[in-house]
Amino acid sequence: QVQLAESGGGSVRAGGSLRLSCAHSVYTTGSYCMGWFRQAPGKEREGVATIYTGTHSTYYVDSVKGRFTISRDSTKNTLYLQMNNLEPEDTAIYYCAATAAGSGWWCRLQGPQSHPSEYKSWGQGTQVTVSS
């Protein structure tokens, strides 16, 4: 299990920006998917952006493409989510997650592999609130 701890949530007006951080411990071997999921009140948890550590390939859900950027600093063991041009619909609890993976295919945000149950390690979540 990887230990994960998010920070950086908060409240902003629509059009504003936030950067989320996720400090994590390290898998002993191999590559893995790391990503950001979110859950709004009354809705299912959904994947927002993922990165495959083996190739640094990134994947995004359509609703955030062009606005959110996922990145990872391996020297600091930290995952980031830069969120620009935020919209009220982005309001949710954002979770950092990780799971071992043999290829980037497992990090894609379409198909059964994108279901939250496929990710074995989770942070505690951080609230993001966007007002209009």
Image (spheres, grey):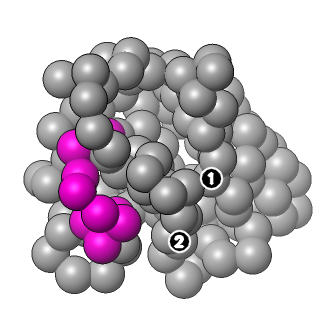
Residue 115 in percent (x, y) is at 19, 64
Question: Which element type, helix, strand or loop, lies under badge 2?
Answer: strand
Type of the residue with mark 1: Ile
Displayed quadrant of residue 45: bottom left
Q: Is residue 102 magenta?
A: yes
Q: Which residues are magenta?
A: 98-107
Q: Residue at x 30, y 72 (%)?
A: 105
Question: Which element type, helix, strand or loop, lies under badge 1?
Answer: strand
With respect to residue 2, does 11 lie above or below?
below
Q: Residue at x 50, y 70 (%)?
A: 59
Displayed quadrant of residue 3: top left
105 relative to 40 in the view: left or right: left
Circle 1 is placed at which residue position?
Answer: 70
Type of the residue with mark 2: Tyr
- Give the numbered dot on residue 60: 2
**Residue 54 visible to an observer of this rendering:** yes
